[in-house]
Image (tube, rainbow, N blue to C red):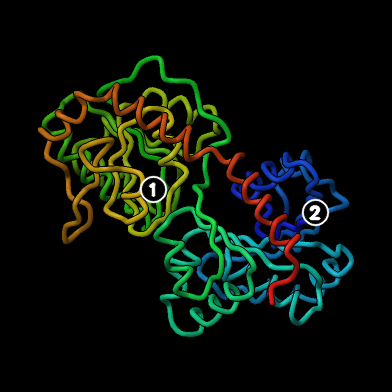
Amino acid sequence: MRLVLIGDGESPHLLKWARALAAVADVELWALSSRGFAVGFEACVPAARRLALNTRPVAGGGNLGLLRQLPRAARWLREVRADWLHAHYLTSHGSLAWAARHLGRAPGRLVGSAWGSDILVTPQRGWPWRALTRMVLRDCTLTTSDSQVMAARMRELGAREVMVFPFGLDALPPAPAAKDAELVFANRGLEPIYRPERVLAVFAAWARRRPALRLVVANDGSLRAALQAQAAALGLAERVQFVGRLDAETQAGWYARAQWYVSLPQSDSVAVSVLEAMAHGCIPLLSDLPANRELVQSGDNGLILQEGPEGPMPPDVDLLFRVQQRADTIASENRAWVQRHALFGPAVQAFVERLRARQAAGPAR
């Protein structure tokens, strides 16, 4: 089976897909990137099987530079003659793949993987974006989603067959040796959609009752300076540590030590960071989103925070104490759930087997 990944080759998420697909027997993997390629691609996709378009697409749209590369992309794909064109992020790379097939005469059937905002946010911007998303979804023989709520929205928009599996972990990490009951960890982007200011507000309310409680904020973004000022204004500068972007090993160390993990985005599908936290035995405190409710039963294996006028509200401190009394049980049950449902390699193997079955059945009529 010859499969071309089409996406942002500088993204660690696309690299993760590439590594998983390269490990599947009898898959000849190629890759087309809207930008360049991360160094790790060298180990799983030879340079002769890669094309970098070297554009600079942005999340907010207006990516005409990518579409201007359509003739070059289509010409390369005609030479590759893939069985499958596997587009990641449907409203940009999915559109490019659709155009290469229908305007550039590139062979291969389309398969798409939704990443979140391409389904949950972009189509809500207006009818042109909905029409574009519908066009791509209807052309896909198969699509993948990392949550049931996003899969339902994809079907509403015209998707045919949708496989649902989390963008999970490569392996289950070792069980943590010990947890720091006073350590809270947060690592979503410091951007408005992730509402990091509410993470600070929730921590502040909680910290008033627990003077030893500390918060470590990883990652970076446009709100970092404002958040540091907010922490100072709340009198928490000595108890909130901003550590910036972390390598995987350092981040794993914080997960392993922290008793608590907080993630309060405004919109999200199943987040790999939440899965990582669960796998490391953290107690998750999450915003009230359908995808989060697929992972956490509030009060059982974590907490879902109620939404207020300004965003997620601080939980009752006595409730936090009661949940913490079951910390060891929660850690064990969450790790077992990740082991059963959220390891990426077996999910990708099943995905490839489904492609083989569709290929054996012949083109859709």
> Upstream in the sequence, badge 2 or badge 1?
2
User: What is the quadrant of residue 73 in the picture?
Assistant: bottom right
Dot 2 amino acid type: Met
Q: Quadrant of the N terminus?
A: bottom right
Dot 1 amino acid type: Arg
Residue farthest toward the top in the current orientation of the protein: 177
Q: Is residue 153 above or below residue 324?
A: below
Residue closer to the observer: 229 or 121: 121
- Tell me, for residue 89, which label it has, or none: none
The residue under the point 30% across, 20% down is: 180
Residue 182 percent coordinates (x, y): 25, 24
Residue 35 placement, left or right of 301: right
Residue 348 percent coordinates (x, y): 62, 46
The residue under the point 17% across, 33% down is: 320
The residue under the point 84% across, 53% down is: 49
User: What is the quadrant of residue 307 in the picture?
Assistant: bottom left
Q: Is residue 344 above or below residue 9?
A: above
**Which of the two marks, 2 or 1, is nearer to us in this view?**
2
Residue closer to the observer: 240 or 285: 285
Residue 44 percent coordinates (x, y): 76, 42
Residue 106 placement, left or right of 9: right
Q: Is residue 129 above or below residue 209?
A: below
Label 1 belongs to which residue? 224
Residue closer to the observer: 297 or 350: 350
Q: Quadrant of the C terminus?
A: bottom right
Residue closer to the observer: 39 or 361: 361
Residue 258 percent coordinates (x, y): 34, 27
- Tell me, for residue 1, which label it has, or none: 2
Kind of element beneath mark 1: helix
